[in-house]
Image (cartoon, helix red, strand yellow):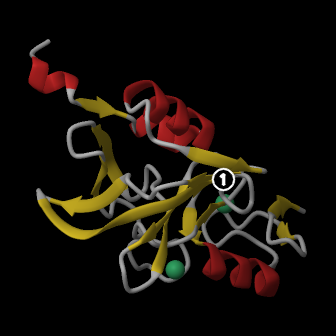
Amino acid sequence: MSPKELTKVDITNAVFKEPIEVLKQISSNLEDIKYTKVIQTFVMEDRRLNLSLENEGSTYFKGKIVWIGNKKDESEGTIFCVDNKNELKQINPTAENTEKIILDLKKETIKISTASKTKCAVCGKNIEIFDDVIGCPLCQSKAHKDHMIDWVRMKHSCPVCKKSLNVSSTGVIFID
Ligand SMILES: [Zn+2]
Ligand SMILES: [Zn+2]
């Protein structure tokens, strides 16, 4: 490998898996990045690590990572909370909205190449990186979390496979 290649680490699989895997990649490659673990969330101490979202090579969002944590429903994957100076944004990279995630060691940046590959099974619009996503436990169809929960509450079934589903008070969809 050339020195140039060594400055970029593909962390796509780690991000799709869980936050602890992402932190392993960060701390083995960027040793002096500090964080504090608060239950399941890793709070970045000096906000040095950047995050950028790119589409077809151009950056459309960037900011400093505030914390890296689990999804609220504890499904697989990682959420990044990013401060872009105006607001705190939560970013949910999944196979539905993300091509590739690179840790750029020189720039101390996590670069996410986004792509809308999947449409919501309820509203038909693209699932984007800022959207909370949920899947049918039977057919794995994906939808915006709010849309799927509203649908299942009303119809008690999946919009795609039509099998019986229900939703718990904590927003977990289960087979009825
Ligand atoms: Zn939707
Ligand atoms: Zn289904």
Q: What residue is drawn where x is 45% and y is 41%? A: 33
From the viewer's side, name the closer residue of 68 and 48.
48
Q: What residue is drawn where x is 85% and y is 71%? A: 170
How many tags in the picture? 1
| Residue 150, horizontal then vertical, whole percent | 72, 85
Element carrying mark 1: loop
Task: Please tell me in which quadrant of the rendered image residue 10 appears.
Answer: top left
Taking the view exactly as shown, the residue that stands out farthest to the top is 1
Within 10 Å of disc 1 (Cα), the crowding (few <14, some 14-19, many 20+) is many
Q: What residue is drawn where x is 66% and y is 58%? A: 71
Tell me if 116 is positioned left or right of 122 in this view.
Answer: left
Against 57, is 1 above or below? Answer: above
Q: What residue is drawn where x is 10% and y is 26%? A: 4
Tell me if 168 is positioned left or right of 145 in this view.
Answer: right
Tell me if 121 is positioned left or right of 106 in this view.
Answer: right
The image quadrant where one finds ligand 2 is bottom right
From the viewer's side, name the closer residue of 37 and 163.
37
From the viewer's side, name the closer residue of 123 and 160.
123
Q: Amino acid at mark 1?
A: Asn
| Residue 176, horizontal then vertical, whole percent | 90, 63
| Residue 159, horizontal then vertical, whole percent | 63, 73
Q: Which residue is mark 1?
A: 70
Task: Please tell me in which quadrant of the rendered image residue 48 appears.
Answer: bottom left
Against 36, is 58 above or below? Answer: below
| Residue 47, horizontal then vertical, whole percent | 44, 58
Against 155, is 23 above or below? Answer: above
Classify mark 1 as within 8 Å of ligand 1 or not, answering yes or no: no
Tell me if 106 is positioned left or right of 36 in this view.
Answer: left
Q: Quadrant of the N terminus?
A: top left
